[in-house]
Image: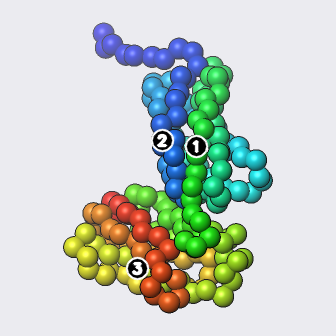
């Protein structure tokens, strides 16, 4: 007779991720997969519309817009019910006005289309700015370059080899670097 493990009861999950955040951070639900969980994520902050939450089930990407304390919460549920909500206080310092608006890139890792999003609140203050978006491979070779004047752009990376890439976003002068992020391409 074959032996099989089963889970009985609510899932017991924890939040894994940094306590101090830049503009873009990832938080994971750590939970026994045998509990067959699904997850409810929320972010609480003093000001409404002060973040963007991108929910991918067992993890979320959060784009923080302001220097503030945010609370990331997680409820793990299954057919038996939900466990106690878990909370994580996050101290976000995404940018100062002299650094320009925060930039999000997702999904990461990416296999086909990389979305680059410039904070809409920051765009209202700098509505006429153009951005130069560059993607470099690990050897420092430029593999993609796009100039935009919109809040977001999608970059096709489907034909790039698996590996680490560096995303640089510059303002219209080409000198002031708004952000530098590491991107993983995995097919």
Query: Where in the figure is residue 59, as x and y percent of width and height?
Result: 51, 44
Residue identified by numbered label 2: 17
| Front-most of residues 122 and 97 | 97
Q: Nearer the viewer, residue 44 or 185?
A: 44
What's the CA distance linking mark 1 and mark 3?
30 Å
Q: Horizontally, is 186 left or right of 95 in the view?
A: left
- Is residue 155 positioned above or below 39 on the image? below
In the image, 22 versus 34, the foreground residue is: 22
Q: Position of residue 24 (x, y in %)?
A: 53, 57
The mark nearer the N terminus, 1 or 3, is: 1
Name the residue that disc number 1 marks.
90
Residue 18 appears in view: yes
- Rendered view: 20 above or below 156: above
Left or right, 50 with respect to 36, comes to right
| Numbered disc 2: secondary structure | loop
How far apart are the alpha carbons under marks 2 and 3?
27 Å
- For the residue pair 104 and 126, the one nearer the viewer reads as 126
At numbered mark 3, what does the secondary structure look like: helix, strand or loop?
strand
> What residue sits right under mark 3 in the picture?
134
Which quarter of the rendered picture does the C terminus lie within? bottom left
Image point (71%, 56%), residue name: 50
Residue 111 makes an appearance in the image: no
Pointer 1 local density, CA inside 10 Å: few below 14, some 14–19, many at least 20 = many
Residue at x 63% of width, y 55% of height: 67
Mark 2 neighbour class, 10 Å CA radius: few under 14, some 14 to 19, many 20 or more: some
| Rendering quarter of residue 110 | bottom left
Q: Quadrant of residue 175?
A: bottom left
Do callouts 2 and 1 mark residues in contact (Cβ within 8 Å)?
A: yes
Distance of label 2 from label 1 (alpha carbons): 9 Å
Q: Residue at x 37, y 81 (%)?
A: 144
């Amino acid at each position: 007779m074959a032996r099989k493990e089963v889970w009985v009861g609510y899932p017991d999950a924890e939040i894994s991720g940094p306590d101090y955040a830049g503009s873009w951070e990832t938080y994971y639900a750590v939970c026994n997969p045998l509990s067959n969980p699904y997850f409810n994520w929320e972010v609480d902050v003093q000001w409404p519309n002060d973040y963007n939450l991108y929910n991918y089930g067992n993890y979320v990407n959060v784009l923080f817009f302001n220097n503030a304390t945010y609370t990331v919460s997680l409820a793990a549920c299954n057919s038996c019910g939900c466990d106690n909500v878990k909370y994580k206080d996050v101290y976000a310092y995404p940018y100062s006005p002299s650094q320009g608006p925060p930039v999000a890139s997702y999904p990461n890792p990416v296999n086909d289309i990389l979305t680059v999003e410039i904070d809409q609140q920051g765009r209202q203050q700098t509505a006429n700015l153009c951005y130069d978006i560059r993607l470099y491979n690990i050897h420092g070779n430029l593999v993609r370059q796009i100039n935009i004047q919109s809040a977001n752009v999608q970059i096709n990376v489907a034909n790039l080899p698996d590996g680490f890439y560096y995303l640089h976003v510059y303002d219209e002068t080409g000198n002031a670097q708004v952000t530098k992020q590491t991107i993983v391409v995995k097919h």
